[in-house]
C-alpha cells in the first residue's frame, strides 16, 4: 500500500485536517464528494461542479457497469475523459446498490448474482469483478466490494455479514493492481456492535489498505445511534490513513462526524434535494415550492456567492420549481453543492485554527434562529 | 412609431442585413430568437444563451400570464431582471397559444375567454390586456394580439379571421404606451391567399407599426407552400421596417426565408430537439439516441466550438440521452442554439458580402453528403 497517500496537517480534538494524494490530483480533507451516479453530477456541467470547490467525485459502479458498461467507458478513455472530469474520482464497489436497486439478487460466498433494474439482464458481481470494473473506469480510489449489513440485524446476522465482507476484502486486495496514485480502501462493517466493529477494523488493518471506510451507517439507525458508533469506530482504524464515512449526509451529520474524526463523505443529499426544490442554507433548509417565496425579491441567501444567489430572486426560483423547469434543478443543485463545499472549507479552516468547537456552536446557533 | 428602430445595412437580392435598436440593446439581423417560454430558455443558464451569440429572446405571454402572472413579474422588476436576461426581449401576444393550449376557449369580437391548461382557472385575453401584460413584462418588442388563422381554412374563413386580427391590431396600437426603445409589431394574416395577405399588409401599414410580422405560416402548410407565400408577402410590408416570420423554423426554412427578405425568426426547434436527443449539424440532423453513436469517441461536429463538441464524445452524449440525464438536455440545447446562431452569423456575413447564393449552395451541398 502507498505510504504517502495521506498527509495529516492538523488536529483539533478528534477532528483532522488532511490531504489525500491521488493520480489525478490532491483532495483537501475533510472533503465532501458530490455523487456522479451515471457519469454525471445530475443537472451540472463538470466545470460548474469544480467551481463549487469540489475536488473529487463519486461514481457508481453498479450504474456504470449496466449502462454504458465498464468496457465501453474504458474504450472511450476512462471515466475522467468520458465525463470531462480531470480531477480525482472515487468509485463505490456496487455492493450497496446491487442490494438496493437490482432485482432477483442471490448472494453467495462467490459474490452476488442479480438482474439489471434497467433491462432485466443477468449479471454477476464478485470482489474480483468489482475491482476490475473500477480499474476499467480508471478510479483513483477503488472501494472494496462488501455487503452493507442491513439495519436492523441480529448480532449473529451482523457478524456473519461482516465476516463475509472481510473475506471479500482480502480477495479485493489480491485483485487490485497497484499503480502510483491509485488507492484501495477497505470498508468496516459490523452493524451497531462495538465488538464486531473492532473485529472488522482489525481484519482490515491486517490486510492493509490505503484508506478505510465506515460502511453500514446512515441506513435507518438515526443520527443519535450513528454518532454513538462514530464515538468509537474511527479510532479503531489506522490513524495515518484517511477515513471515509459512506453515504453521509446532512450538514449536521457531517459536522458531527468530522468532530468524531471522519475525513471524507459522499451523499446524494445536495443534488437530489436540489432537484426536488430544497435549498440548504446557513439557517437550515428551505422548501422553494412554498408559496411564501413567490413574491420574494431576495435571494436564497444574500451571503452566498453561488450563481443562484447572485443572479436570482427566491420568487424566480419558486417559479422555476413550480413550473418544473430544468433550470430550477440546475440552480438549486449548484447552490446546494456550493453550500456543502463552503461548509467543508469552513470545517477545514476551523480545524487548522483549532476553533472547531466555536465553528460548531455558531453552526447550531444560526440554525436555532427562525429561517429568514 | 419610432423612426429609427431599424437600420438597413446591406442587401443581397431580397435578403437584408440590418440592425434593430431596442431599449435593452441592439439586435443584428437576420436574427434568431431562442424561445424562453416560461421565463427560461429550457435547460440553459441565460449567460450560456448569450454565449451562443443570441441577442434577443422570445417570451410567451400565455405562459407567463398564467404562471407566475404578469403583475408578479412586474413586482419582481420585469422579465429581464426576473430571468436575469439584461438584453432585448420580444413577447408574443398569447394569441397563438391561447388557441393551441388552453381549454374551453370562446373567441369573440372583444377577445378570447379561456380556461388555464394548468389549473382550469378562467381568464380573458383581449388586445388591450395582451398589450398591458407585455408592458408589465417590460418587453422591448410587443406583438399585436391576433388570431392565427388555422390551416386549412376556406377563403371566407381566412378573410373573416384576418379582418378580426386587423381590428384587434388597431386596438393594440391604441393601447400601446409609446416609450423610447419599446417597439410594437403588427402581424400580417390572410392564410395562403395573396389578396388577403395584401389587404392585411395595407391595413397594418395604415395603422403604422415599428415592425411587421408574418403570422399564420409554419402551421402545417408545408415548406413549399410557405415559400410560395414568402415569394410575395414580405414585399407587401414597409421596406424600412423589420420583418419577422413567426414560429420558423428548421435551418433550411430560415435560409429560404432570409433569401426571401425576412429579418427575424423564433422557434422552439433547437431547444425542444435538444431535449429529445437531436443535434443539428452542418451535415443535417443527428439522432443521438441511435446506437451507432454509443462507442464513437468523436464529437458531434469537430468543427463546432460549443462546449458539447469541445469537451464530449458522441458516445458520452448518447449515454446521457439514453439515461435521460439532464446534462444531455443541457449539452444538446447548447449545441443546437450554437448551431442556429452560427447559421445566422453566416447568413449576415454572406448578405454583407453579397455572397448569399454561394452560402446557400454550400449549405445544400454539405447536407447532400452522407452524415459523418
Image (tube, coloured by chain):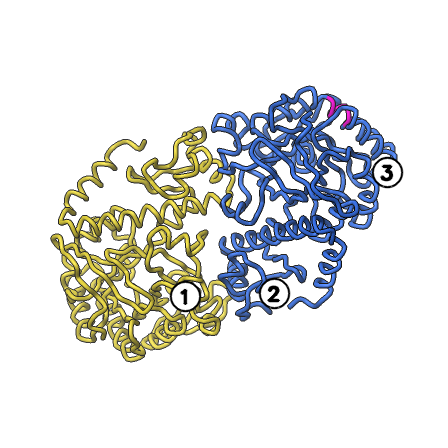
Chain colours: A yellow, B blue
Q: Looking at the image, which residue is at 76% across and 28% down? A: B165
Question: Looking at the picture, how far across and down is residue A66, in whole percent?
Answer: 46, 67
Asked whether A257 or A347 is in front, the reply is: A347
Do discs 3 and 2 share a chain?
yes
Question: Looking at the picture, how far across and down is residue A277, in whole percent?
Answer: 42, 42
Asked whether B139 or A228 is in front, the reply is: B139
Do discs 1 and 3 share a chain?
no
Do discs 2 and 1 share a chain?
no
Q: Quadrant of the C terminus of chain A?
A: top left
- Secondary structure under tag 1 reads helix
Instruction: State which chain disc 3 sits on.
Output: B
Q: Which residues are magenta?
A: B166-170
Rendering quarter of residue A178: bottom left
- Secondary structure under tag 3 reads loop
Question: Looking at the picture, how far across and down is residue A64, in whole percent?
Answer: 44, 66
Query: What separation in Å lies between label 1 and label 3 (alpha carbons)?
Result: 59 Å
Q: Which residue is mark 2?
A: B290
Q: Quadrant of the N terminus of chain A?
A: bottom left
Q: Earlier in the sequence, mark 3 or mark 2?
A: 3
Q: Looking at the image, which residue is at 70% across and 45% down? A: B248
Q: Is residue B43 above or below residue B284?
A: above
Q: Looking at the image, which residue is at 55% across and 52% down? A: B334
Q: Which residue is mark 3?
A: B193
Amino acid at each position: 500500500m502507498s505510504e504517502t497517500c495521506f498527509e495529516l496537517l492538523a488536529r483539533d480534538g478528534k477532528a483532522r485536517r488532511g490531504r489525500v494524494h491521488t493520480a489525478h490530483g490532491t483532495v483537501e480533507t475533510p472533503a465532501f464528494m458530490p455523487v456522479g451516479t451515471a457519469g454525471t453530477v445530475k443537472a451540472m456541467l463538470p466545470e460548474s461542479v469544480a467551481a463549487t470547490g469540489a475536488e473529487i467525485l463519486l461514481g457508481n459502479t453498479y450504474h456504470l457497469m449496466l449502462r454504458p458498461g465498464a468496457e465501453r467507458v474504458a474504450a472511450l478513455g476512462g471515466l475522467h475523459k468520458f465525463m470531462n472530469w480531470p480531477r480525482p474520482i472515487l468509485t463505490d464497489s456496487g455492493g450497496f446498490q446491487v442490494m438496493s436497486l437490482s432485482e432477483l439478487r442471490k448472494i453467495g460466498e462467490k459474490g452476488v448474482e442479480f438482474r439489471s433494474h434497467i433491462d432485466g439482464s443477468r449479471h454477476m458481481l464478485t470482489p474480483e469483478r468489482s475491482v476490475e470494473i473500477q480499474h476499467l473506469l480508471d478510479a483513483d480510489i477503488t472501494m472494496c466490494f462488501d455487503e452493507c449489513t442491513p439495519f436492523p440485524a441480529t448480532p449473529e446476522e451482523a457478524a456473519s455479514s461482516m465476516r463475509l465482507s472481510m473475506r471479500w476484502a482480502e480477495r479485493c486486495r489480491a485483485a487490485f493492481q497497484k499503480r502510483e496514485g491509485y488507492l484501495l480502501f477497505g470498508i468496516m462493517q459490523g452493524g451497531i456492535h462495538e465488538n464486531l466493529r473492532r473485529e472488522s477494523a482489525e481484519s482490515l488493518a491486517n490486510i492493509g489498505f490505503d484508506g478505510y471506510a465506515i460502511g453500514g451507517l446512515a441506513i435507518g439507525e438515526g443520527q443519535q445511534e450513528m454518532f454513538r458508533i462514530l464515538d468509537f469506530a474511527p479510532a479503531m482504524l489506522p490513524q495515518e490513513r484517511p477515513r471515509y464515512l459512506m453515504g453521509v449526509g446532512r450538514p449536521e451529520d457531517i459536522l458531527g462526524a468530522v468532530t468524531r474524526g471522519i475525513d471524507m463523505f459522499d451523499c446524494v443529499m445536495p443534488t437530489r434535494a436540489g432537484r426536488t426544490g430544497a435549498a440548504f442554507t446557513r439557517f437550515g433548509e428551505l422548501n422553494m415550492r412554498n408559496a411564501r417565496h413567490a413574491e420574494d425579491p431576495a435571494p436564497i441567501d444574500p451571503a452566498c456567492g453561488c450563481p443562484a444567489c447572485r443572479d436570482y430572486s427566491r420568487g424566480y426560483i419558486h417559479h422555476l420549481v413550480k413550473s418544473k423547469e430544468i433550470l430550477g434543478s440546475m440552480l438549486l443543485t449548484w447552490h446546494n453543492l456550493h453550500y456543502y463545499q463552503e461548509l467543508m472549507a469552513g470545517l477545514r479552516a476551523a480545524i487548522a485554527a483549532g476553533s472547531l468547537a466555536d465553528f460548531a456552536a455558531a453552526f447550531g446557533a444560526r440554525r436555532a434562529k427562525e429561517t429568514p
